[in-house]
Amino acid sequence: MALWGGRFKGEASVQFKRFNDSLPVDYRMAVQDIVGSIAWAGAINSVGVISDEEHIRLVAALNELKASVEADPEQILLSDAEDIHSWVELQLIEKTGDLGKKLHTGRSRNDQVATDLKLWCKETGGDLLFALVNLQQAMMNLAEREKDTVLPGYTHLQRAQPVTFGHWCLAYVEMFNRDIGRLKDALYRLDVSPLGSGALAGTAYPIDRNALAHSLGFRTATMNSLDAVSDRDHVIELLASASISMMHLSRFAEDLIFYNSGEAGFVEMSDLVSSGSSLMPQKKNPDACELIRGKSGRVFGALTGMLTTMKALALAYNKDMQEDKEGLFDALDTWQECMEMAVLVADGLKVNRSRTLAAAQQGYANATELADYLVGKDIPFREAHHIVGEVVLAAIDKGVPLEDLTISQLKEFSDKIEQDVYQHLSIESTLNKREALGGTSRSQVKKALATTQSGNEAILNEQVVGAPGKQRIEGALKQVKQRLNAQRAAAMSVRRARMSDVDCIHQLTNFWADKGEILPRTRDNIIHDIQNFVVAELDGNVVGTASLYIYQTGLAEIRSVVVQDDAQKQGQGEALVQYLLEFANQMELEQIIVLTYIPQYFEQLGFNVIDKNSLADNIIEDSEPSPHKDPADEVAMEYIVGQSK
């Protein structure tokens, strides 16, 4: 049933209804529409449109509807309502009768949809902000791990000067920092409530719009009703923020695709973010990065589409603006998904340090150092530049790096060159000289890490406009701090176990079984279940292992999480568990359980205590407690895949 049929003699065609209806898209704003309706019920109660008793009944019905929608949002799609506003109102009328028809007094779908969308943007913006901080943190973790790793720097895709891998990571930390700033700015500007603006001229009831705005969590109300109902700047700003950030993510992906290539061989990506070839068994493709790069165009398209839609719209509301949500929802979903995937890429990245060092030593990357050396000998830079160019040509002819030229060969180009030149031509010297702010020296990388880390914590501690409350902020801060505590975890190369790992796994599990920490595993059992195991490597040696046992569709158990005794408290255990949780997510498992004597450890990883008696008998039988422990001390815990973020 349409809410506007009185003016019409005939019914709209089925084809037009399908073309006109927006419910398949805007149903995602159901909770926001109900929250806005609850606030509006309070506003019209304050001016006497509805009585206190009617207000209580409406709010109770709306809260009941909100709980139902939160439990099953897709129930809305079974309706033939025109849009989410119509659906909510029809549901309310069904629950309260004619009272439900009073709620829309003084309100238009124009200010209603503008309010719903801003509320949705505020909440989603908070999620995106935390995703950006987590992404930045992941790059900082990688920078910390690889702060001493030498990497060739490039201009024009030609080797230029050596940098560190940590410095490369921090370049993206800076980009993501600007993305955070843009997003916070956009969230601040959209934090004004249009509710009470009516269709275009404002409401005829003496409602305190600022009080109404505050009740919805907005910092203030809009100042002009025409602008309020027709403004979609916030949509464009969020799409612009997403587009710029996706551009950064695409550059990040492109760098790693190049570094991962056989020609460079600087990095290897985790199995979690790679795929193989259906024809060529040797291939390991960087699909996660290629998809991030590809999806950037989709986000750019949403921005272009919205700008084009809005560019010639007369005031005030026009139905063209219904096109604002589908592109926005898709773009912000894509942005968040790509950020989360980039975190997974960064966490699992293995850097081939010998290969990056060898590459940095090639290509005469220390030519600038020789020029600087000559400048220090009172030779003008332009002259020094010319001299070094000739030295490079000579070195190329001889097929040797600059540092392998003898002192007599170097003196052929300038008699100012002395024996001390060689200390300036080393990679270490090249890096250490870059001590100025923002340089690639190791000390500058450490300073940048410390500065950005304190900035991240400040962002999460702020009462950011649009962030979903103190508890949510504290949860996100706890998550980032967990990342900090596990910075070395990413240094582990966690991978699926191979047959060649059987003896290492057997040795590790039996060591801890003898101490009574886990149940023993026979070698034959490990061989039989090798596909369920993962291992963590450090410097090429297996230092930890864990397994994922799948009981049935949707349910699995993490078992045998053990780490070598002399490699404890460095994050390997967390890295193993996180790998298995990501694998469980890809396998579309729903519930992961553990039976443990150290529940506080798994609680930090997102597990929650459950009643052990709720587990099926076969799980208890398979996971009988250690004979060295009191069975009463064993705790059952669960992780719901996709909910713990």
Image: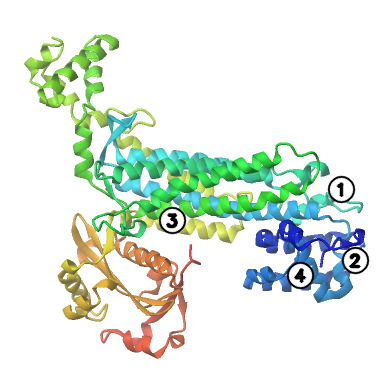
Up the image or down, 443 lies above or below 116; here it is: above
Query: Mark 1 or mark 2: which comes first in sequence?
Result: 2
Q: CA distance from mark 3 to mark 4?
A: 38 Å
Residue picked out by circle 1: 202
Question: Residue type at mark 4?
Answer: Leu
State whether residue 578 appears in this view: yes
Query: Mark 3 or mark 4: which comes first in sequence?
Result: 4
Quarter of the image with the N terminus is bottom right
Give the number of the disc on residue 62.
4
Query: Mark 3 or mark 1: which comes first in sequence?
Result: 1
Q: Nearer the viewer, mark 3 or mark 1?
A: 1
Label 2: few (<14), some (14–19) or many (≥20) C-alpha neighbours in 10 Å = many
Question: Residue type at mark 2?
Answer: Ile
Give the number of the disc on residue 50.
2
Query: Mark 4 or mark 2: which comes first in sequence?
Result: 2
Label 3: few (<14), some (14–19) or many (≥20) C-alpha neighbours in 10 Å = some
Residue picked out by circle 3: 481
Query: Quadrant location of residue 183?
Result: top right
Q: Is residue 474 left or right of residue 439?
A: right
Horizontal and vertical percent for residue 135? 45, 50
Q: CA distance from mark 3 to mark 1?
A: 47 Å
Tell me if label 4 and label 1 are in contact, CB under 8 Å: no
Q: CA distance from mark 4 to mark 2?
A: 15 Å
Label 4: few (<14), some (14–19) or many (≥20) C-alpha neighbours in 10 Å = many
